[in-house]
Image: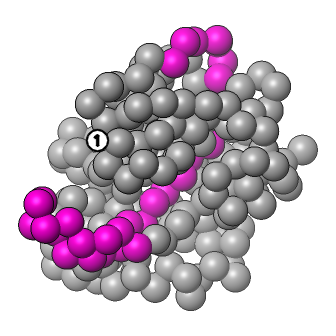
């Protein structure tokens, strides 16, 4: 069973307790949670939930992968699946699928065990080949520290490259700003 509306709402409330100034930017998420459809399903439009893994190595660099579909350098992540028990589990599954890093090789960043580092709302262009209109992803970005060194093994169907970037060069401005605040 995919993450429930109650779970998503509780995670969002915990996040907003840390970042109350972001409430208005999450309005598309609140509308999706109020609807009568599954907000984690990839065909729920105009907005659905996705999850990403912000993976930090021992020298404070962040893993980025090149997604084939967009050509963008992003954190490993993507759509929820029916078997994902919660949002963090979805991020860990995506990390393992796209970068070959298993959940046992990472631990949640201290103080981020139950709260994402970032929640970002961004627009996805229409994709007529998939019969998808333009829509929004609400991406719950979970922070993990590598607990053991593990090689990156890319899922060639979806990913075509990777790099480790210092915090100041993280691709997402909101992630970059929040990483800069870490001790």
Compared across the picture, whether 108 is left or right of 152 comes to right
Query: Which range of residues does the magenta coloring cover?
Result: 123-152
The coloring applied to the image is one colour
Q: What residue is shown at x 21% (from left), y 39% (from top)?
A: 83
Query: In this view of the protein, can residue 113 be seen by the observer?
Result: no
Task: Tell me residue 33's x, y (percent).
Answer: 32, 76
How packed mark 1 is, by other alpha carbons closer than 10 Å (few <14, some 14-19, many 20 or more), is some
Q: What residue is shown at x 47% (from left), y 40% (from top)?
A: 66
Task: Tell me residue 14's x, y (percent).
Answer: 59, 64
The single residue placed furthest to the right in the displayed view is 183
Q: In which quadrant is the C terminus drawn? A: top right
Rendered image quadrant of residue 134: bottom left
Label 1: state its secondary structure: loop
Query: In this view of the protein, can residue 127 be seen by the observer?
Result: yes
Task: Tell me residue 21's x, y (percent).
Answer: 70, 82
Residue with the mark numbered 1: 84
Looking at the image, residue 105 lies above or below residue 38: above
Answer whether residue 130 is magenta in the image.
Answer: yes
């Amino acid at each position: 069973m995919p993450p429930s509306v109650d779970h998503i709402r509780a995670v969002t409330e915990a996040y907003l307790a840390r970042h109350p100034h972001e409430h208005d930017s999450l309005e598309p998420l609140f509308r999706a949670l109020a609807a009568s459809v599954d907000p984690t399903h990839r065909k729920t439009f105009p907005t659905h939930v996705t999850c990403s893994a912000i993976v930090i190595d021992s020298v404070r660099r962040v893993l980025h992968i090149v997604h084939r579909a967009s050509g963008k350098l992003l954190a490993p992540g993507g759509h929820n699946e029916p078997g994902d028990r919660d949002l963090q589990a979805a991020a860990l599954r995506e990390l393992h699928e796209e970068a070959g890093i298993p959940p046992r090789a990472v631990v949640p960043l201290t103080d981020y065990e139950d709260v994402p580092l970032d929640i970002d709302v961004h627009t996805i262009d229409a994709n007529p080949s998939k019969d998808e209109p333009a829509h929004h992803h609400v991406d719950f970005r979970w922070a993990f520290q590598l607990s053991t060194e593990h090689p990156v093994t890319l899922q060639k169907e979806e990913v075509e490259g990777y790099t480790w970037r210092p915090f100041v060069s993280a691709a997402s401005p909101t992630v970059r700003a929040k990483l800069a605040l870490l001790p």
